[in-house]
Amino acid sequence: MNNIVGKRREPLSDTKLLMTITISIFVAMYLLAMALLGGGFLHPQQIFDMLNDNASLIIVSCGLTIVMIGGGIDISVGAVTSLVVMSCVLYLNNGGNIFVAALLAIGIGLAFGLVHGYLISYLEIQPFIVTLAGMFFARGMTTILSVNPQKVTHEGFQSLRDVKIEISWLGYTAKNGNLVPARMELGVVIAFVCLIAVFILLKYLRLGRCFYAMGGNQQSALMLGINVKRTRFLSYLMSGCLSGISGFVFMMHTGAGNATNAAGMEMNAIAAAIIGGTLLTGGVGNVAGTFFGVLTLTTIKKIVVSSGLNDPWWQNITTGGMLCFFILLQSVVLSRRNGSKKKQS
């Protein structure tokens, strides 16, 4: 009995606390949109549309979460995604194989991750500079491949792109009385596989714990026997690989390649990771929070559009305001939390 009384509930870790805040805000925001705006927010298909439109962003954000937890940054992911899309479109239009196109996408991503990881980890060049150079290089290569938009004409790929997962019990009845089932694209399944894989890596595998240790305090990580250079190298390699997968998923969604594909995706991915509770300083973050960060970012944009503010700058303003709000919220929560810990000690 004394043992039961004496037990204290352990406080949430910083990662879980920030993730809980993000999920709570997303749920409150979506429920408010349902109550005030109605329309599409009342149908489950709205959630599926958000997932369909942002499957590639979810994958890229997972890679950036790994890098940011380790204390790094990668601003090349959007440009790499664009290069992958254009490369795969041109390859398929010239009679290529779908499986080989998928390998090509992953190969391009791994190549960028390999170069970035080596320059940052072993030559100790600043991550921002290296990935900035990678971003310009990828954009230039995309333009060299084709300045004009390219649509995928490969019949096999079109058939793959048309595959939809239908969930009838989450559908709704249209005005003509027909049942419209909820539809989810194949890219969403790939995004969830990547999300679950990264979640398991960060939570249960030693490498994931090494990312947190490296981002929290590099000197402490070295004292624990962690090979910091190799760990940082692997974080960028994984980010590049996920960028390649993201490019293939992006192509499955749009069915076309363009020099401006995925423009600004890296900023949206960073914003989603921060909103999800990942700190730029490293050591704190979770891909589950990042997932809800993507949904929160998308929801606020849809709310703006549903409110009649269709001009693109309103979405940018609200995104910036939301990002500032979450950064301020994280700062306040963590500062108070650390202050209370000091008082207890």
Image: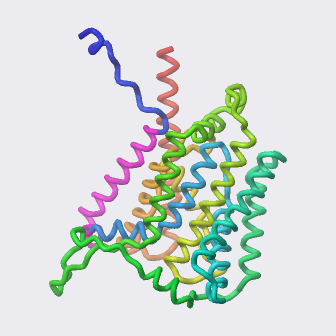
Residue lying furthest left: 177
> Magenta residues, as a range?
16-43
Task: Decide which of 113, 268 is in the foreground and name it.
Answer: 113
State whether residue 325 appears in this view.
Answer: no
Residue 331 % position (x, y): 53, 38
Per the picture, the main secondary structure of the magenta-coloured stretch is helix
Residue 6 % position (x, y): 31, 12
* In the image, residue 192 lies in the stretch drawn in magenta: no
Q: Please name the residue shown 40% across and 44% down the image.
A: 21
Residue 317 % position (x, y): 51, 63
Q: Please name the residue shown 49% across and 35% down the image.
A: 14
Task: Decide which of 61, 27 is in the foreground and name it.
Answer: 61
Task: Decide which of 18, 97 is in the foreground and name it.
Answer: 97
Against 237, residue 331 (above or below) is: above
State whether residue 254 appears in this view.
Answer: yes
Residue 302 % position (x, y): 39, 68
Against 246, residue 181 (above or below) is: below
Q: Please name the residue shown 76% across and 68% down the image.
A: 136
Q: Please name the residue shown 47% across and 70% down the image.
A: 187
